[in-house]
Image: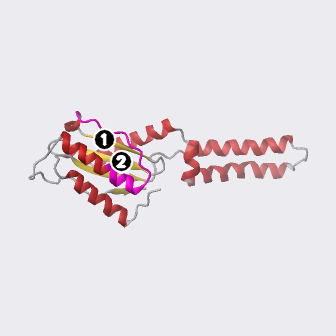
Amino acid sequence: MIRTDAPFVASVERAVRDAERGTTAELVVVVAARSGTYRDVALLAGAIAAAAVLLVALFARRIFPPVAVAFEVPTTFALVAWLVHRLPSVLRVFVSEARAKRQVQRAAAWWFVEEAVHGTKARTGVLVYVSLLEERAAIVADLGLSAVPMPELRWRSAEEVVRGIGALGALLRERCPGTPSDANELPDTPRIVS
């Protein structure tokens, strides 16, 4: 799990500065706690747990008082739904890979516009979007880099994020080299969002 503390922010900022050296590309890093709410997943888990409690109450040899069943079923629903929604490691079990990937890509596209990554003079902005709950990353490049194949990433640790940014910088230096006079148009500090 990535801790988004001050050392992480400093190491990512350094990695972005190094990656931008020697290329016209401008990198922006956004680290999000999650890319989707997944409330439907939590509610479904709660409903399944509540149905299981109801089935036990209906088919057990012991007879449960109706008041207890009326209390236990909705309480189980609410508690399980709340726990699944609040615990990333549990929620991750219920979310499919395809949905996680889709959510990360959708959120990355939104942050690309929100952070104005498309606002560079040469249209060479690159968003590196890291989503912690999904343990995935997405790279969105602007039109000036459409010929550069961007890798699909899955980063689970701070070290992997820094190494990945370095590898992306090497690819960008090779595909779209810059000049020493290239100005830094976008901030290097990662944006941490909840």
Q: Residue at x 83, y 51 (%)?
A: 67
Residue at the image point whose x is 30% and y is 38% from the top: 150
Q: In front here: 158 or 41?
A: 158
* Residue 144 in view here: yes
Give me the C-alpha separation between circle 1 and circle 2.
8 Å
Query: Which residue is label 1 attached to?
Result: 140
The image shows residue 6 at horizontal and vertical percentages of 36, 66
Question: Please, what is the dominant secondary structure of the magenta stretch?
Answer: loop
Residue range of the region highlighted in magenta in the rendering: 147-164
Contact flag, marks 1 and 2 (Cβ < 8 Å): yes
Residue 180 x %, y %: 10, 52
Task: Rate crowding at label 1 as few (under 14), some (14 to 19) or many (20 or more) other CA atoms within 10 Å.
Answer: many
Left/right placement of residue 40 relative to residue 120 reads right
Residue 116 seen in this snapshot: no
Label 2: which residue?
Answer: 129
Q: Residue furthest top?
A: 147
Q: Is residue 85 magenta?
A: no
Q: Who's the residue at 87% across and 50% down the image?
A: 65
Say whether disc 1 or disc 2 marks the residue closer to the N-terminus: 2
The one of 188 and 71 positioned closer to us in this rendering: 188
* Label 2 residue SS: strand
Residue type of the residue flagged with mark 2 = Tyr
Q: Nearer the viewer, residue 61 or 72?
A: 61
What residue type is disc 1 on?
Val
In this orientation, which residue lies closer to the viewer: 119 or 162?
Answer: 162
- Residue located 26% across and 45% down the image: 126
Looking at the image, the residue that sits furthest to the bottom is 6
Vertical arrangement, residue 123 with respect to residue 17, above or below: above
Corner quadrant of residue 139:
top left
**Which quarter of the rendering shows the C terminus?**
bottom left
Tell me if residue 15 comes above or below residue 143 in the rendering.
below
